[in-house]
Image (cartoon, helix red, strand yellow):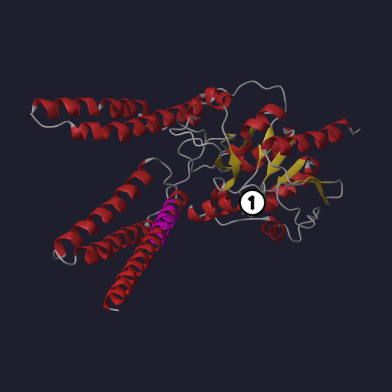
Amino acid sequence: MRGQAEGLADGTRVVLALVVAAAAVAATAALSYLAIATFMRVWRRAQAKGYTGPVTPAVLSIVTLAGLVGGAFLGAVLAGPDDAALVAGPSTVLGVVAALGGLALAVRVLPARPVRSGRRRRPRTPFRVLGNVAVATPLPVMVVLLLNGKPATLGIQLLLPMAMLSMLCHSAARRADRIDAVPPADPRPAVVWIRGFGNERRLFGFRRRDEAETRDRPELKEVFRCGARPMPFDDYFAPAIAAGLGRGYGLGNPRDYLPPDGLDRHYATDDSWREQFAELVAGARCVVMAPGDWPELRYEFRVIRELGAHRRLFVLTPPARKARQVRRANRLTGFRTEDWADLAAALDGEPGYRLGQDPGPGAVVTFDDDGRGVVLERDAEGPADYVAAMLRHLAEVESAPE
C-alpha cells in the first residue's frame, strides 16, 4: 500500500510539473505576442508621424532589447540562489514592459516631422558604404582578437548579423536608386492604385516570388526563401499587373523615406496632388483598389465618376486562401482589418455609386454605367485570376462605341 501511495504521489508531481511547464510556455507565448504587437504599433505610430527611415526601427529595437537584458540582469542581481527562476522571469517582463511603455510615451509626445513636398530627393544615408562596412567588419575583429591571443568567437558570431545588415543596406541602396531612375517605357496606359497611406502596407494575400521578379528587382531578394509569404496589395499584384495590364503605380506617401516594394509611386506636391490624381485617372487604363476607408476616398470616387472612369474601377477583395493567417498577421502588425462593410459605410450617400452586397472573398467588382456594383469574378485564388477577370471586362469596355 505504501509503495502504491508513493507511486501515486510521484505521478501527481509529474503531472503538476507538466501542467506548470505547459502554463509557463503558454504564458511566454502570450507575453511574446503582446510585446511584438505593442512594438509594431509603436513603430507604426512613429511612421505616421513621419519617422519612416531605417534609424527608427533600429532605435526601437535597441531600447526594447535593453529593457529585456536590463530586466534579466536586475533579476539576476536581486535574486538569491534559491529563487533565481522566480525573480528573473518577472523582472525580465517588467523590463520589457518598461521599455515599451517608455517608447510609447516618447512617440506620443514626439512632434510630427514636416511632410516632404516637391520632387522626391535621394536620401543622404550612404547605404552602400554602410553595407560594405558591415560585411567587412567581422574579419578585422577576428584578426585583432587572434593577435591578442584571444579566441575569435566574437568575430564568428558577427558573421551572420553583419551579413544580414549588409544585405538590408544594399537593398535600401537599390530602392533609393529607383527615385532617380527613369521608368521603363511602356506603350500601354497605366494602372492606377488608390488606397489610404496609413494602410498601404496592410497585408492582402499570400504569394511566392518567382526568379524573374527578383532578377529584375534585386532589392526584392529574400535572405531566407520560405515559399509563399503574406504581401500587401501592391506587392501582391505588381508582377501580374505589369505582365497583363500595364505599368502600375499610384500617388506616393509624402512621408516615404524610400520607395516601398511593389507598384511604382508618383510623388505629387502637397498643393497639386488633386490635379495630378485627376490626370492619372484620366489617362489610366483602369483603377484598382482593395476595400477600405480613408479620408480622401469619397473625393477620389467622385473624381473617378466625373471622369467617367467608374467602369474601369475595380475593387478586389482578398482571396479566401490563408485569409485567417493574413488577418492574424495584420493584427500583430497593428493593422485593422478593413472589409466591404467599411467601404460601403465610407461611401454611404455618395451620389453615383451603389455597391450592393458583400461579394465574398476573391472577388473582382466593377461598376456599370449607372454606378451599380457588378461582380465579375468570385473565389479568385491568385493574382492571375483577378487580372484575367479585369482583362475580360476591359476588352468589352474598350471595344464599346463612344
Q: Is label 1 in a helix, a strand or a loop?
A: loop
Rendering coords of residue 336 (x, y %): 56, 57
Q: Amino acid at mark 1?
A: Glu
Q: Which residue is situated farthest in the front direction here?
A: 1
Q: Is residue 86 left or right of residue 220?
A: left
Give above or below for 296 relative to 393. below
Q: Which residue is situated farthest in the left direction here?
A: 149
Q: Residue at x 27, y 60 (%)?
A: 92
**Main SS, magenta residues:** helix
**Closer to the camera in the image, 44 or 318:** 318
Quarter of the image with the C terminus in it? top right
User: Is residue 35 inside the magenta stretch?
Assistant: yes
**Magenta segment, which residues?**
30-43
Q: Residue at x 69, y 53 (%)?
A: 298
**Closer to the camera in the image, 64 or 251:** 64
| Neighbours of disc 1 within 10 Å: few (<14), some (14-19), many (20+) | some
Q: Residue at x 52, y 56 (%)?
A: 331
For mark 1, what is the residue? 296
Rendering coords of residue 350 (x, y %): 76, 57
Q: Which residue is situated farthest in the bottom direction here?
A: 1
**Closer to the camera in the image, 188 or 34:** 34
Rendering coords of residue 385 (x, y %): 73, 37
Q: Quadrant of residue 216?
A: top right
Q: Which residue is situated farthest in the right direction here?
A: 401
- Residue 272 appears in the picture as rendered: no
Give above or below for 63 relative to 19. above
Rendering coords of residue 357 (x, y %): 78, 58
Quarter of the image with the N terminus in it? bottom left
User: Is residue 258 inside the magenta stretch?
Assistant: no
